[in-house]
Amino acid sequence: MDVRIRNIAVTLCALMPTWNGLASEVRHEPTLGVDHIPIVVRNLERATQWFKDLGFAIKPGRAHRNGIRNAHIKFANGAGLELIVVDVPSDSLALRYKREAKHAQGPMFVSFYARDTALLKGLLGNYPHQHHRGLTTLSSPALSYLFFVRDNRSPSDRAGHFSHTNTAKHMHAVWLAPKRSVELEGLLKDLDLTMSENKTDRGSKARPFVPRRTYHFTDSEVRLFGPDSQIVTDRPVIGVTFKVHDVERAAKTLTQTGVPFSSDIEASRRIIVHPRESLSMWIEFRE
């Protein structure tokens, strides 16, 4: 295994809680889906306050040996956002986060959950990959922004961590804009995802909310945009969609805290926070 990739895998594993009593044994639960998005920030306290202003509950994280500190926005299935700041880096991943945060705050990776490791290994048969302590990384540089976790839920999760005043109930979609989509789309097809294509109004900088294609997990989606939709160069993760119980209440929360947003409530029951108002990412709330 490449030393750099192994170091990244080991460190990411250390950041994620493990839960031996996996609910994957519940047969009706989806086995594959969008899990969490690591986001690099320069000031963890400011970033957590901003997400509180968006109406999210924050689960405090902890300081790690490699210099990373984190905090979490979580949902019951383990999906969510991980806010990451680096004080004094002591390994390759922490050093990379430190450098990237200096360049621009925002999402760095996306993870998918795979409850059944044996099934995942079978689906990844044509993809060189490494598996270590519940985390699977891919060797292809074209897919270096993507990894798999078995389960990001933790015994320390509490109901209050999932009680968001914006009424968000789960993380529904990740928005991706890779330079080349062929590798990603090949992977998503090999994971046996269904695809729907928008043939009338392709996503672009002029129409940033409209993906070219959408790949569907059972409980979540991957929305695919063109490379010109990248917000930070060479970072494919550009946005996230949260399903909410009440979009009017979400809009009221943002209005009360002074967060600007675009409203499309009457037509499509959604509101969107622009990347210039956030951490270099689109944030959509949709019923």
Image (spheres, rainbow, N blue to C red):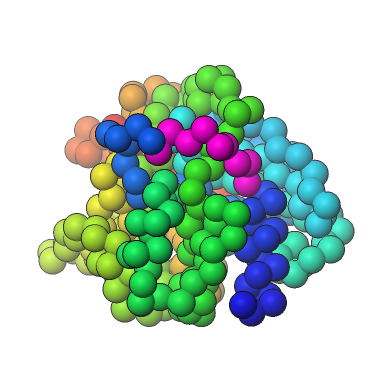
Residues in magenta, as a range: 16-24
Left or right: 118 in relation to 20: left
Q: Tell me the quadrant of the picture where the C terminus can be found.
A: top left
How many numbered marks, from 0 up? 0
* Residue 285 lies in the magenta stretch: no
Determine the residue located farthest toward the right in the rendered image. Answer: 88
Looking at the image, which is closer to me, 187 or 252? 187
Looking at the image, which is closer to me, 230 or 19? 19
Residue at the image point whose x is 60% and y is 29% from the top:
155
* Residue 23 lies in the magenta stretch: yes
Q: Tell me the quadrant of the picture where the N terminus can be found.
A: bottom right
Residue 205 position, x and y percent, is 36, 67
Residue at the image point whose x is 20% and y is 38% from the top:
267
Q: Is residue 131 visible?
A: yes
Left or right: 116 in relation to 138: left
Q: Main secondary structure of the magenta part?
A: loop
Residue 213 position, x and y percent, is 23, 63
Residue 22 position, x and y percent, is 48, 36
Residue 194 position, x and y percent, is 19, 57
Q: Is residue 265 visible?
A: no
Residue 172 to residue 57: above or below = below
Residue 243 to residue 39: above or below = above
Residue at the image point whose x is 31% and y is 41% from the top:
30
Residue at the image point whose x is 37% and y is 68% from the top:
124
